[in-house]
Amino acid sequence: MQIGDVRLDLVADGTFVARPRYFGEDVPPETHPELFGRHQTAFLPIGCFLVRTGDRLVLVDAGLGPEQQDLPHGMHLVGGQLLTGLRALGVATGDITDVVCSHLHADHVGWLFDRDARPVFRNATVWYGAADGDRFVTGPGSMAAHIREGFRDPAHASRLRPIDRDTTVAPGITALPAPGHTPGHLCLVISSGQRRALLLGDAVTCPVQLDESTWHSMSDVDPALAARTRERLWRELEDGNTVGAGAHFPELQFGRVLAGTARRWLT
């Protein structure tokens, strides 16, 4: 899709197999059959976005990597497709100039470093929330050993950019703090001319949360703060020139909020 002069492509690294418990202990699947289907299971993408702006090629989120990860309650993540998806777009790993991680959970950092902790995107600057670095890289948060080693390697320090405030990453791309899911979660604003796209990461897991304000993410570190962040983002998406999508939105489909007495998600 085009946002003014900026091109935005969607790439999925794999699938997040989710169940109602992901959104809360008492979530009834029958209320949203369009999401959970007959088997009380939602098949959501592990989404990434490729942004072309000027001479920069920016990858937003780095997938799970060539991994499978089991989660509680019969949920799991299956990755491994990102590099194939990039090749289909005519992009090699060495072409990427920047990688922006919305946050440092496993399904957003998996292709940053290979099993030997070497950068996969060897020419890229890596941007991420500073508070997530404190939690996952130097703190107690869960992170794969080779990913943590890659972040901690002094040889890679010059290409790492922790963010703690609104930051211009590239022309037309601004990273904004959107905490709650993780302490340093970021959202990306892509803007050109009068049009904007919000890349929501996991600040919003699924559009049904517009109707279900009490549904949170099982992995929200601060559910109350995450809910306030979601509400702020919904308000941003009421602007008719702004569309948004999250990393796990079904089919990575963009949409906006139609304001009114009862707000609706419009694709």
Image (spheres, helix red, strand yellow):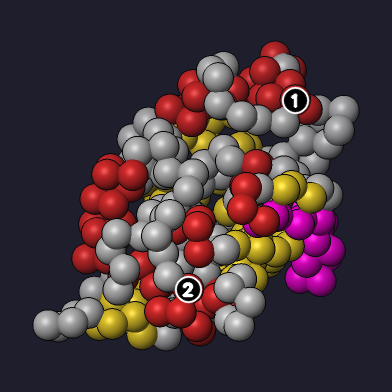
Is residue 86 at all visible to an observer of this figure?
no
- Looking at the image, residue 144 sits to the left or right of residue 54; the answer is right
On the image, the x and y values in percent for residue 159 come to: 64, 29
Q: Is residue 81 above or below residue 170?
A: below
Mark 2 = which residue? 29
Number of disc labels: 2
Determine the residue positioned at 43% across, 27% down: 131
Say if the magenta span includes residue 89. Answer: yes
- As drawn, is 170 to the left or to the right of 122? left
**Tag 1: Cα neighbours inside 10 Å, few (<14), some, or many (≥20)?**
few
Magenta region: 75-97
Front-most of residues 225 and 99: 225
Residue drawn at x 55%, y 76% is 36
Give the position of the N terminus as an image quadrant.
bottom right
| Of the two numbered discs 1 and 2 in the rendering, the one whose residue sits closer to the viewer | 2
Q: In the rendered structure, which amino acid carries the disc numbered 2?
A: Pro
As drawn, 113 above or below 38? above
- Which amino acid, by three-letter code, is at mark 1? Ala
Task: Name the element at disc 2.
Answer: helix
Q: Measuring from the top left, give residue 142's x and y in whole percent.
A: 61, 29
Q: Nearer the viewer, residue 53 or 245?
A: 245
Q: Position of residue 242 (x, y in %)?
A: 33, 73
| Element under disc 1 | helix
Q: Which residue is mark 1?
A: 145
